[in-house]
Image (spheres, rainbow, N blue to C red):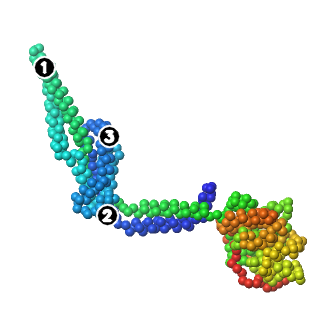
Amino acid sequence: MEIRQYFSVFTKWWWLILISVAVAAGSSFLATQAMAPVYQSRTTLMVGQMLQDPNPNAAQLYMGQQLAQSYADLVTREPVLKATLEALGLNWGWAALKAMVSSRMIPGTQLLEISVTDSNPRRAQVLADELARQLIQISPAASDPEKEAEREFMQSQVNELRANLRKGMQELAQLNTAIANATSAREIQDLRNRQASLQAQMTTWQSTYAQLWSNLQRGTSNFLSVVEPAQLPSQSVGPRVANNVLLAAAIGLAISALVAFLLEYLDDTIKTVEHVQHILNLTPLGSIAQIEGKDYPGMLVAARYPRSTITEAYRMLRTNLQYSAVDHPLRTLMVTGAESLDGKSLTAANLAVVLAHAGQRVILVDADLRRPTQHQIFELDNHVGLTSLLLDPAATLSRALLPTKVERLYLLASGPLPPNPSELLGSKRMGDLIEMLRREADIVVFDSPPLTAVTDAAVLAPRLDGTLLVVRAGRTRRAIAQQVKHTLTGLGAHLVGVCLNNLPGRRTGYYYAYAEERQPAIQPVPHAHGLNSRGGARHPAR
């Protein structure tokens, strides 16, 4: 699909998309407003004692971060959650608490953050603190008293060695001063011996200090301590009305757009001129917008509103028909549709009007002997017509042809409806009548029944110079239109092209701007029969 086609889907189904977005957003707003507010409290722990170490190395930092990640995962496990509930005396399932708890290791640090979300702010604070306490209690340093005592002993030894080293440094400085001020060789030698002995002792202290410090760090690398206790939250963190509404609107938009494209994909009707070209491989001779009107006479726009845009579309159809038959002029033309209500009768009537406006003598024949409508469109009677000429030897063409309100346009109505329309249209008498009509007019337009409904059009089409197929946009199915095309070509009929009718994309109200002029093609012409059409008008086939 092209970008224009994607855009056309949105413009066609804008109401569905708008309703879906509005319903989704409104439902989300109401549901969010009905929710109880929730609060969040968090506590932060440090893994190890890097803050007390003035010069931590990379290995210690890496180990602390790995342990922090492990502890973050351990917070949401069953042992910690169950111990927390038991300590607080809460008769909950640990899975319920798990849904309220989240934990994470702050990237690039050895900090562990525990968060608790609850509708009760005080309970959220207590749960966060208790989770931190239970995590500390199950850590190795807290669970082994002997190791804790050993760590304290090593810490005291480290402190003692640190003091001895500082004192030794001071004594070395004093010995250096004394050596510089000594006056005898014996005194200098004694001072140097004391200096060497002290340096050896300090070397031993430094080695022991380094070993104890390394052991102490290995024992405290998994040490947990609270650096930020949980606070009592004063403001709720949810539900977030704006976020929920926007998310629901986005979901509604996505679903409605998907449904719109799915409907378009499943819709196998012919909707555009491009469909006519690609699916039927036929020339689209015209595209007519939807005609608005309450009855048939009001929809004869070519006669009532000759300056309207729809009338211009019929003029374009007339011109394209003339160009399509430049080598073999159309003297007889059948207008038919694939199905009922495709608008073939209105197309035939308006086409006949614009042909007459072009200066041609036109006879419009209502060959739909099952549901005739042309006498209703032109507000003429239907007592004498086509069937009269075929069945009554006394009937004459001059009496059957009815002048219309359009100059040079005459109507041959259907006449009384027969029980055997197909046999009449296929009779030799019908062939003679067609030749007689040829001599009386420049062009004869036949309005025939739909091809898929009955065989009348199939019988009549091979006898005429050309056939115009009327397809209703958005209603005629592709398979049916293709079937009609194959039927006509199989019968040897000359299918000159397709008229795409009832296009919804064009505004049809423009011709009403000329209604106040009340300018018909010509003034009404009196006709031989003053009676109106028999029977009331049916709902127009647009």
Residue receiving disc 3: 62
Quadrant hosting residue 372: bottom right
The one of 465 and 13 positioned closer to us in this rendering:
465
Sooner in the amino-acid sequence: mark 3 or mark 1:
3
- Say which amino acid is labelled 1: Asn
Q: Specify whether residue 301 is in view.
A: no
Q: CA distance from mark 3 to mark 1?
A: 46 Å
Q: Secondary structure at mark 1?
A: helix
Residue 245 vs residue 369: left or right?
left
- Say which amino acid is labelled 2: Ser
The one of 458 and 57 positioned closer to us in this rendering:
458
Residue receiving disc 1: 193
Q: Who's the residue at 42% across and 68% down the image?
A: 30
Image mark count: 3
Locate the N terminus and report the quarter of the image it occupies.
Answer: bottom right
Residue 115 vs residue 396: left or right?
left
Residue 333 vs residue 472: left or right?
right
Q: Secondary structure at mark 2?
A: loop
The residue mark sitting in front, 3 or 1, is 3
Residue receiving disc 2: 119
Q: Secondary structure at mark 3?
A: helix
Quadrant hosting residue 9: bottom right
